[in-house]
Amino acid sequence: MRGQPQDFDRVLSSMCTPPHPVARDAAERFLATNPGDPGTYPAVAELEDRAVELLGDVVGLSDPAGYIASGGTEANIQAVRIARNHSVSSDPNVVVPESAHFSFQKAADVLAVELRIAPLEDDYTVDLGAVRRFCDEDTACIVGVAGSTEYGRVDPIPELGRIANEHDALLHVDAAWGGFVLPFTDHEWHFGHAAVDTMTIDPHKMGQAAIPAGGLLARDGSLFDALAVDTPYLESAKQATLTGTRSGAGVASAAAVIEELWPDGYRENYELAQANADWFAAELRDRGFDVVEPDLPLVSASVPLDLFESLREVGWRVSRTGADEMRVVMMPHVTREMLESFLSDVDRLVPTANINT
């Protein structure tokens, strides 16, 4: 084989990271299993039950229902599908913040629901007044983001839950990236804090599981009933997942790594990542760049386009927000040494540091 796997020593924009050793080992042992057919593969089905149980511990839910999906996109599509199928409206709509992941655009297209996009406040969280104005008798679901992909912000989830309740709508929380750092903050974001119905949380992001290992959880297992289809040629009679064949490797790795790291290992990862984010933001600010204060371990800063392109030309994997800030995500593989090397290149490429961008 000629190809080589991705080297992460200059990857600063990805929300994925190399899997933890226990996740890698578990994934390799379950490569040929399919949790989509639990009757045939009972061992990996048991591991999926364990993974869901452990995710429940992370998100404040004592008796969670759910499954290990391919990632946040599938989980978000399924959450919208649950809401649509439970709605009594013939023309359902879903209200999402402007910060919502692009997977909700896919969900609206695939499921033929109207997507209503609420603007953000100055702090990059959703405008609750706009959410209230957008909701009506056809609203099937309200979405809150717990750890947005561009700024790492957390929407006011309890307030969104109250609005959803007023309109007899479901509340879905997208914590795909934030779910494994938020337990160590003061944010109110999970099932124990608010009337959350469904949640996306991805073990293959900050959870350090092997890809693919997303997660969809629900407070009430009956929410999945409207998704179930008959599977007559399998040993199991019904299936509520979006995909049929699924990754036993992802399931096994998720169960193994959460069991290994929750909670102390994840707390240590968060504290290190947040310290790096705070330090890096201060370093960029000292150089004259406008920086969005990092609430979670993600830094966005305004840098000139020519500097951004030059950094990519020398091998740094950085990306830009919709407003054209450079974003850097403090994943477990991002070390202080990497950040120092990055800043050295910034200084070299911009000899007149302390420029005002």
Image: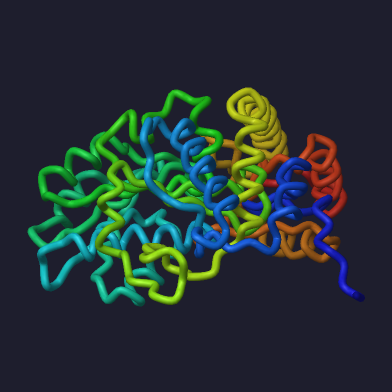
Question: What residue sits 67% from the left and 44% below the top?
Answer: 208
Of residues 154 and 325, the one drawn nearer to the viewer in this rendering: 154
Image quarter where the N terminus lies is: bottom right
Nearest the eye: 305 or 149: 149
Counting every numbered tag in the picture gives: 0
Residue lying at 34% horizontally and 35% vertically, measured from the top left: 191
Residue 161: name its quadrant.
top left
Residue 108 percent across, percent down from the top left: 32, 71
Q: Is residue 272 above or below residue 132?
A: above
Q: Is residue 16 left or right of residue 154?
A: right
Q: How is the image coloured?
A: rainbow
Residue 323 in view, yes or no:
no
- Name the residue at the right extreme: 2
Find residue 350 and report its horizontal and vertical position in percent: 81, 52
Judge whether 294 appears above or below 249 on screen: above
Residue occupying image coordinates x 25% and y 37%: 195
Seen at 43% across and 50% down, the residue is: 200
Tell whether 157 sits left or right of 140.
right
Residue 19 seen in this snapshot = yes
Query: Residue 139's quadrant in the figure?
Result: bottom left
Percent position (x, y) of residue 207?
A: 61, 42
Tell me: 320 left or right of 59.
Answer: right
Left or right placement of residue 266 versus residue 125 in this view = right
Find residue 219 and report its horizontal and vertical position in percent. 31, 41
